[in-house]
Every structure is written in structure tokens, then in C-alpha cells.
Image (tube, helix red, strand yellow):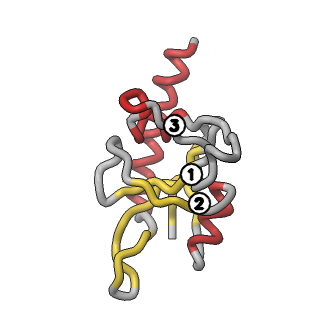
Amino acid sequence: MKGVVVTTDLEIHVQDFREPLYKTVGAAVGGYIEHVHPMGLKRPYCMIVNEEGLLENLPINSIGCLLYGTALHQCQIVGDIVIMKDGFRNGAPDIVGLTDKEADSISKEFVALIAELKGEQS
């Protein structure tokens, strides 16, 4: 299953994840996973974050914060994030992977966001 990983250093890459997702996606975010539906990400897409990232004082993820709407409510997204989508596996609601086309499209959107962010910081 594919997901788009966005690091706190604003690096983006598409990564393949295998079962069990809580372990492989957990390794990408550096701990226990939390499934989030940020206001800046249209469904069925979702963001996977480190559940204990704030407790662990992980660095801020600028893209995660933009997607989550941190400017409105001041709750930050920290640590690396993974974008996947909601779907069904084995007849039950679950996190599923992105198609190649979805992963490519999301990656390109984030590259544009990062260029904007870096332009603002200059």
C-alpha cells in the first residue's frame, strides 16, 4: 500500500507499506499511529501522525499544520506524517493505500505548498 510521507524537513516521498500497517506506518511516523482527518485534506484522504509526538517534543511539521488548520486553533502537528486514505479492507472500514495517480497528485500539491512556504520564509 502506498502513502505519501512528508517529513519535518519538508521532504516528500512515496513509500510502500505492508501489513501490519500499525508497525510499518508507525515506523515512518516514529511511534504509535493516530488517524487524523484534517480540514485541509479532502476525504477519503487522511493523515497518519505520531500519537505521542507532542509528548515526545517532535519538531513541527509545517505541511501537517497547514492541512490541520493549526492557524485557526493553535493545535500543532509534529513529526513526520503519512497521507493515505480511508476505505474498506476485508469488509471493514480501514486505512488503505493510495493509487499511483493519487500519490503522484498529492506529492505534486505538497511540492507546490513547500515552494510557497520556502518563498514566504526567504
Disc nearer the start of the sequence (2/1):
1
Q: Residue at x 59, y 71 (%)?
A: 22
Whether residue 45 appears in this view of the structure is: yes
Q: Please say if the residues under marks 2 and 1 sit with CB atoms less than 8 Å apart.
A: yes
- Residue sitting farthest toward the left: 43
Q: Is residue 112 visible?
A: no
Q: Nearer the viewer, residue 52 or 116?
A: 52
Residue 45 lies in quadrant: bottom left
Q: Residue 76, which numbered label?
A: 3
Question: From this viewpoint, which residue is outermost toward the front?
Answer: 55
> At label 1, which amino acid type do we have?
Val
Indicate which disc residue 38 carries.
none
Q: Secondary structure at mark 3?
A: loop
Q: Earlier in the sequence, mark 1 or mark 3?
A: 1
Q: Secondary structure at mark 1?
A: strand
Q: Residues within 10 Å of mark 1 (few under 14, many from 20)?
A: many
- Mark pair 2, 1: CA separation: 7 Å
Judge depth for marks 2 and 3 and give the one in front.
3
Horizontal and vertical percent for residue 81?
55, 50
Read off the residue under disc 2: 15
Residue type at numbered disc 2? Gln
Label 1 sits on residue:
5
Estimate the spatial distance between the alpha carbons at disc 2 and disc 3, rounded to whole Å: 24 Å
Residue in the picture at 68% in, 56% down: 30
**C-alpha separation, residue under disc 1 versus residue under disc 3:** 17 Å
Percent x, y of residue 34:
51, 59
Q: Amino acid at mark 3?
A: Gln
Q: Residue at x 39, y 87 (%)?
A: 90
Q: Nearer the viewer, residue 52 or 49?
A: 52
